[in-house]
Amino acid sequence: MSANSRLRRVGTAATVVLLLGTLAPPAHAAPELAPVNGFDPLVRLQAGDTGEAVERLQQGLADAGFYRRPADGVYGHETEAAVMAFHKYLELERTTSWNGLDWIRLRLLDDPGLPHRPDEPDRVEVDLGRQLVFVIRDHQVTGVLHSSTGGSYTYFSERNGAHVRASTPRGDFTLRWRQFGWVCDQTTGWCVYKYWAFTDFYGIHGYRTVPSYPASHGCVRVNTWDADWLDDHLFVGMPVHIWDEPPVTASPPDDPAYPPDLVGEIE
């Protein structure tokens, strides 16, 4: 199965409701659950693990758009971030460990719940509720990135000379300009990696730390390796939409971007 074959088509309605997404992992469980017909062994994995099961996990996450590194069989930081994004996607506990039931959740992955935007085949959707960045090209989700946005705390801004609130702006924007590599602000001393501006003061950029919760001063942080991946998937002028809850947008039933034969498709 190719990597693109597992990507969710934006706006399709799932025909299966994944009840397993609401289950919490058992407190004290064996490393492997009993086999389930039609599924590979439900092995529990965590940081530091290596081997075939980790490689299988990385490939599955890559096919679904969460993982963007080589499937090397090493459960490192990149795999932890992909697992974190997967758990955020399903609104599960935000952990970096892979639970046995997560194999089933991955196979039956539901629609991402993004707004219909038939006039924008290429765009970025920033989901502040789930703390995720969705990159969409040709109406398909090509990447689901773990992110951290404005932390809603108050801090002293050296640039403004006053206390301000760390908040990410909501609304509809476009990518205005970009920077390459690490760039440090001469006023504040903060350094960001591969910055993509969507306002005069805020952008999407790589950073050394991307926690599971909102922590930035207002920009959209992603991991540095994801910032590298964005090089080939973003462009100046690309629409960016930032929201707490997905806005309701209508998609005409005869819209060619959402053909009827793909509505409700589950792979």
Image: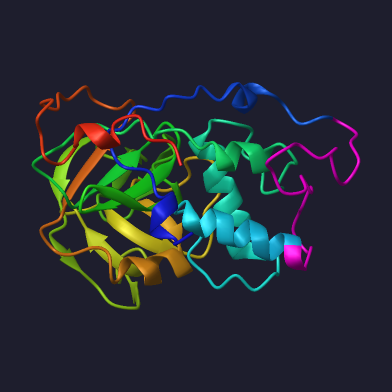
With respect to residue 23, does 171 lie above or below? below
Q: Nearer the viewer, residue 192 or 13?
A: 13
> Can residue 191 be seen from the camera position used here?
no
Residue 190 percent across, percent down from the top left: 39, 65
- The image quarter containing residue 153 is top left
Residue, x 38% and y 43% (percent of image)? Answer: 8
Residue 91 percent across, percent down from the top left: 54, 30
Callout count: 0
- The image quarter containing residue 164 is top left
Residue 45 percent across, percent down from the top left: 77, 52
- The image quarter containing residue 127 is top left
- Horizontal arrangement in the rendering, residue 26 relative to residue 7 (left or right): right
Residue 44 belongs to magenta span: yes
Magenta stretch secondary structure, dominant: loop
Q: How are the residues colored? A: rainbow
Q: Nearer the viewer, residue 172 or 24?
A: 24
Residue 138 belongs to magenta span: no
Magenta residues (range): 27-52
Residue, x 19% and y 37% (percent of image)? Answer: 258
Q: Nearer the viewer, residue 225 or 15?
A: 15
